[in-house]
Image: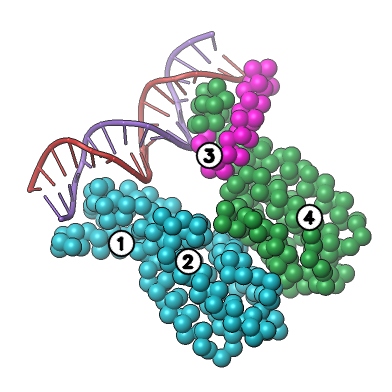
Chain colours: A cyan, B green, C red, D purple
DNA sequence: ACCTGAACACCGTTCAAGT
DNA sequence: ACCTGAACACCGTTCAAGT
């Protein structure tokens, strides 16, 4: 990438991080370009769709979740591993308001820039679920898609101002439906 | 209301029902006015905010839920009553895609046209919860707000095309976290 | 009383013109 | 190669002018 293009890209991403944190995943792309001091066309070349931008913003979090899943897959308690990873998944989505809807829709849309990452997240969760089920720590009548739905639902609830303060409690209530014989997890 | 005003109101509501069913709660109000053969100003006088329109669309469902709650409050099993009502709440929200976000936000916004209805729904759910808790059919560490959050989360998950087909299963999984000693409910 | 539609300030996307 | 910004087709809201 040419030096000026790289500078614009970095600047757009930095500004987008601030604006999307402030206003959520539906923030005005025009406004981001404006505040980054960049033309509208430049915005669209670097990030042709909103998903492309969200993917870049979530990149670090996605990589962290992937690494964390790899660790947890060989950790002591399969039940605790699943609960820990789910909690981090929800926390990651909570970084940018409204992003969970895109993360859920991306699963079924191979065209989405978020597709690969989200399919990966779903698969990582599914592996932790299978291990927990094999050890008798998780109920066996749910699959990876159910788990992703539950994680998405929890993330969405946490996104709502009316419920944000009860994220931890609701997490415990809902995970108790999946995991057996656990104390409150925090 | 003058006869022509009444006709415009009815026409707007009929068209809105179709358009919001097709495109969800974020449908273009301009488009609704256009398809109703009505000026933009008329649209805004009858329905000054999007919430006003949604409230009118959901009116029937809200009234049905209120009546159903009254019945269920004196029905045989407190646990079954809560589960039945929750299921109907989720089904009601599912009539119009995306409406659950407004129904959740309205709880904390007294200015919203949906406020009174949604506070009423929340209170009805809370009454059924309290009765179930008193009979030992529901866990006692959740309150009416937790229940509304869980109902909202389920409604949101059902709204996502990726998960819509598993609504019933996810409902059973999540309600099992709240209710004790119940068989799969459908 | 009630209705209409132009005007305004936004939005995302495209693309001709510049460097 | 890369950037800019006008042009286009939308959006919700307001309000002067009509009946």
Q: Nearer the viewer, residue C9 or A127?
A: A127
Q: Which mark is residue B27?
A: 3
Chain assignment, label 3: B
Q: CA distance from mark 2 to mark 4?
A: 34 Å
Asked if residue B105 shows in the view, the reply is no
Q: Position of residue A4 (x, y in %)?
A: 16, 60
Corner quadrant of residue B166: bottom right
| Same-chain check, marks 1 and 2 | yes
Q: Which mark is residue A13?
A: 1
Instruction: Name above or below for residue A172 compared with residue B68.
Output: below
Q: How many marks?
A: 4
Q: CA distance from mark 3 to mark 1?
A: 30 Å
Question: Do the numbered discs 1 and 4 sit on residues whose CB atoms are within 8 Å?
Answer: no
Chain assignment, label 1: A
Question: Do the numbered discs 3 and 1 sit on residues whose CB atoms are within 8 Å?
Answer: no
Q: Position of residue B130 (x, y in %)?
A: 81, 65
Q: Helix, strand, or loop for circle 4?
A: helix
Q: Helix, strand, or loop for circle 3?
A: loop
- Magenta span has B8? yes
Residue hosting label 4:
B85
Q: CA distance from mark 4 to mark 3?
A: 28 Å
Disc with the residue nearer the chain's start (1 vs 2)? 1
Span shown in magenta: B1-29
Q: Give the residue displayed 56% in from the left and 79% down from the top.
A: A128
Residue hosting label 2:
A119
């Amino acid at each position: 990438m040419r030096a000026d293009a790289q500078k614009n890209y970095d600047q757009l991403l930095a500004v987008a991080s601030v604006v999307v944190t402030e206003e959520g995943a539906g923030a005005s792309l025009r406004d981001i370009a404006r505040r980054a001091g960049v033309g509208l066309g430049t915005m669209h070349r670097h990030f042709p769709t909103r998903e492309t931008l969200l993917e870049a913003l979530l990149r670090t979090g996605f990589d962290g979740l992937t690494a964390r899943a790899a660790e947890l897959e060989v950790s002591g308690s399969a039940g605790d591993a699943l609960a820990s990873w789910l909690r981090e998944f929800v926390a990651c989505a909570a970084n940018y308001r409204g992003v969970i809807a895109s993360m859920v829709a991306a699963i079924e849309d191979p065209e989405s820039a978020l597709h690969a990452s989200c399919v990966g997240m779903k698969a990582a969760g599914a592996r932790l679920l299978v291990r927990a089920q094999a050890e008798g720590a998780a109920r066996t009548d749910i699959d990876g898609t159910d788990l992703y739905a539950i994680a998405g639902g929890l993330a969405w609830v946490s996104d709502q101002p009316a419920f944000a303060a009860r994220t931890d409690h609701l997490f415990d209530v809902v995970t108790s439906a999946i995991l057996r014989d656990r104390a409150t997890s925090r």
